[in-house]
Amino acid sequence: MSPRVARVAVDVPLAHLDRLFDYEIPEPLAEAAVVGAKVKVPFAGTTRDGWLIELSDETRVESLARLGKVVSSEPVATPETYGLIRAVADHYAGCWSDVARLAIPPRHATTEKAPQREWPDPTPLGQHTVLPAYPEGDALLEALAAGHSPRVAWQVASVVDGPGDLLGGVMEAVDATLRSGRSAVVILPTVRELEPAVSRFRAAFGHGAVGVLAAESGRSARYRAFLAAARGEARIILGTRSAAYAPVHDPGLVAVVDDGHDQHSELRAPHPHTRAVAVVRGARQNTAVLLAGHSRSTDAQALVDRGWLRDLALAPSEARRISTPVRAVDDRDRERDPAAVALRIPSVAFRFLRDHLAAGPVLVQVPMAGYDAALDCARCRNRAVCGKCGGPLRARAKGEPQCALCGHRPVRWTCPHCHTGQLRTPLPGAARTAEELARAFPGVLAINSSADRIRDEVPDEPAIVVATPGAEPPTPSGYSGVLILDGEITLARADLRAGEEALRRWSNAVSLARGPRDGGSALIVGPPQHPAVQALLRADPVGFARRELADRADAGLSPATKLARIVGDSEAVREFLDNDDWAGVDILGPTETGSGRWAALLRSPIDRAKDLTGRVKSAAAIRSARKERGMLSIHVDPESLEDR
């Protein structure tokens, strides 16, 4: 008889070894060696971790090495989980083991062996009110409750409650999915957004019915939630990036909140994006997909244009009727504004603050944290740089310049151009803005929510809350007004997605304000003619995303075009490019990007995306097999073309 064979995914991040390996199962391990188990196997003279993916009685290998040890018989790498990880790895031309580290949390033996608590059935919600306010919102809920798998991009109105209740709408979609007997996974960009979402979900569905998958929860708690999902006990899982792989039984919905947030993109290779994982999972496992946010990413719009996602949004005229109204004032008017000499905001913004403070707290969004976000020479206006490393100077506290790169704090700074020692501030940070506004409005509480001073919530009382993007604390009933400063600085970021990201940040800030019926409004200090500002004023992020997508199609950029960015040492990049003839692929570069780093961009039409990623993976496998030297990184569908 043929020996019993275990096909194992070995934890070896080498492209030419990215496949299953056959091992003989010794008789003492036959009972413990189950599909999905974590094992130890001999590999190239060492012992490596691995996951048992398949069992068979046949093999093409004449002489098999024997399985070393079954670390755990808990089936954490089921065929469904393996297939999802494999598909994501192939989508990004990466290795299975690299994605597995992101998807499967480290084993915690004590937690695995301990008795697990019982998970109660989630409590059904009452009447749904958020999604039905949108065209076809009722149809979406009915489809989910009937066991269907709709795929939707939900454009949420920018207002604090009612149709703007993003989490409320996601909860309604989850509730409808649960009614069909299926499970739901919700992914949020950061722990800061996750914590209040968990509290709200547990208050609605029951404290014991909601699991949390996030590294910040701790190793034991994270593994406990993962086991509960894998065992079919947890039907609702919330978490950050890794939760997209949560092995819930009978998955019915994968919802991604604010898919344009940069924290949805994994920093570790192969850099999978949560949105892409949700799309791959929806296609493989026939689950519903919901991308929800107060703005629209160009990637989501590309999926809508290709017909993979359906658009769930209000018409701009209807969105303006219920969303917080927004006005714009040109920042250049400040130079001709006598009232803005002592204060860095135009007189229109000053009156906006004064008028809205009478009704409650006012949010002031600024782009940078610290006291002075940037420093210039007071005489020649050149950028102030560090005398040690040449990095830009900034000030986290008043009168304390510090290098943004090396952290050096010069006792006395001297300009290398004009040799003066005086500094000026072209861009005040959140701390200085809060200080200046506190002086301008004596007796009014001024709160700084940025950097290491992020507030979780502020009360419903008159106060000026200065916050950086993503650090805006909510209020119980919403802000009476939102003032967005330095819009031109936000738009001037050296990034191809600067306009898209600016609109996302501004829309999220405006969504914290009260609606027009409650007197809420917003004011942005920035160039009114800019398309991103116009989209904010017209409450039309979808139109802006369509325009951005068309511009990227003309320029041959992602997501209208499939891209792979190769970065590394000069010789490593050139050797990689020699590993394929790249017929039908546009090659831009290689070009030097600084500090001995070179980059090349591979580009192909979107309908040949699978061919490009397959060839990139093949070239990487040849490089790995040949043991080609030098540092090299591969990034498919890069969010940015700049080095981070």
Image (spheres, helix red, strand yellow):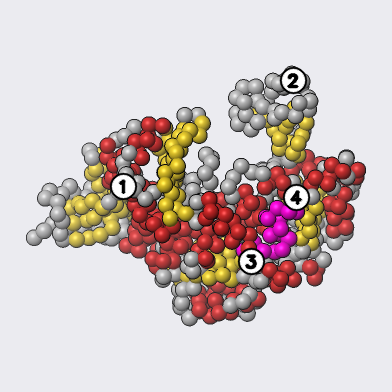
Q: Are there few (<14), some (14-19), or many (20+) residues within 10 Å of tag 2? A: few
The answer to whether residue 12 is above or below residue 187 is above
Q: Is residue 538 magenta?
A: yes
Residue at label 1?
618
Q: Nearer the viewer, mark 3 or mark 2?
A: 2
At 50% from the left and 56% from the top, the residue drawn is 560
Magenta segment, which residues? Answer: 526-542
Can residue 402 be seen here? The reply is: no
Q: Is residue 79 magenta?
A: no
The answer to which of marks 3 and 1 sits earlier in the sequence is 3
The answer to which of marks 3 and 2 sits earlier in the sequence is 3
Residue 418 marker: 2
Residue at label 3?
156
Residue at label 4?
526
The answer to whether residue 60 is above or below residue 255 is above
The answer to whether residue 318 is above or below residue 531 is below
Residue 355, x across and y down, in percent: 88, 58
